[in-house]
């Protein structure tokens, strides 16, 4: 029984270590090493030039989505957390859903909402804002055209989701 508990604890530590791809080496590691360390991507795009983009969404409990870029040579070019203000401002009215997915990855399906009177589809992501407060980022689409209408952010405490005190991350 002790051996099983030790094995489970070790597996838990390994899983945590791979959360953000720590240990991956730019220009050295490739697709196989990324998958081995980070697991199966939430989404993946193959480009005509042979490069790949992988999205690793860590929600709904987590605050991160990591984008990993593999060059045409099969080697890791870049890895970054994309749920932040620097990436959110890249999402502008008129973009389509695929553009949004390539910038910040998939939203949480359970948090998708459709508002019939406005013919509006809303996707939502959980992230940690610049003040280390749990927050939500929403992208509002015109459902007919599937184009971005607008975006907004709100903290979980502003949404009344925290119970007592501040939501921190």
Image (cartoon, grey):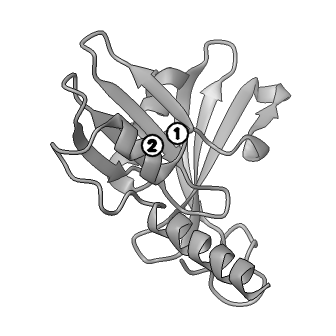
Judging from the image, what secondary structure is the residue with disc 1 in?
Answer: loop
Q: Residue 52, how many percent across, how many down? A: 34, 26
Q: Secondary structure at mark 2?
A: helix
Question: Would you place residue 36 above or below residue 21 in this image?
Answer: above
User: Is residue 23 rendered to the left or right of residue 139?
Assistant: left
Q: Nearer the viewer, residue 117 or 24?
A: 24
Q: Label 1: which residue?
A: 41
Q: Nearer the viewer, mark 2 or mark 1?
A: 2
Residue at 59%, 50% in the rendered image = 125
Pointers 2 and 1 in contact (CB under 8 A)? yes
Q: Quadrant of residue 69?
A: top left
| Residue nearest the observer in this picture, 114 or 27 | 27
Residue at the image point whose x is 73% and y is 40% from the top:
109
Q: Mark 2 or mark 1: which comes first in sequence? A: 2
Which of 140 and 67 lies nearest the eye of the viewer? 67
Q: Dot 1: within a 10 Å radius of its alpha carbon, few (fewer than 14), some, or many (20 or more) residues? A: some
Neighbour class for label 2 at 10 Å: few (<14), some, many (≥20)?
A: some
Q: Position of residue 150 (x, y in %)?
A: 53, 36
Cα distance between the residues tagged 2 and 1: 8 Å
**In the drawing, what numbered circle is on residue 65?**
none
Left or right, 167 with reference to 102: right
- Where is residue 144? Give x, y as percent: 69, 13
Which residue is the extreme one toward the left? Answer: 27
Mark 2 lies on residue: 35
Question: Can residue 89 be seen?
Answer: no
Residue 29 vertical placement versus 61 (above, below): above
Left or right placement of residue 20 versus residue 50 in this view: right
């Amino acid at each position: 029984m002790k051996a099983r508990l030790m094995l489970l604890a070790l597996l838990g530590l390994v899983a945590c270590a791979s959360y953000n791809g720590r240990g991956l080496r730019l220009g050295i590691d490739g697709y196989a090493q990324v998958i081995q360390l980070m697991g199966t991507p939430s989404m993946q795009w193959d480009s005509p030039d042979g490069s790949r983009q992988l999205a690793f969404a860590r929600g709904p409990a987590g605050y991160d989505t990591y984008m990993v870029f593999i060059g045409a040579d099969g080697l890791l070019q870049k890895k970054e957390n994309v749920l932040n203000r620097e990436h959110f401002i890249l999402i502008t009215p008129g973009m389509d859903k695929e553009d949004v997915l390539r910038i910040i990855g998939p939203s949480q399906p359970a948090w998708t909402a459709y508002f019939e009177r406005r013919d509006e589809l809303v996707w939502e992501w959980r992230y940690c804002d610049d003040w280390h407060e749990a927050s939500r980022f929403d992208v509002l689409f015109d459902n007919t055209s599937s184009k971005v209408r607008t975006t907004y952010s709100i903290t979980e405490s502003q949404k009344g989701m925290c119970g007592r005190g501040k939501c921190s991350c």
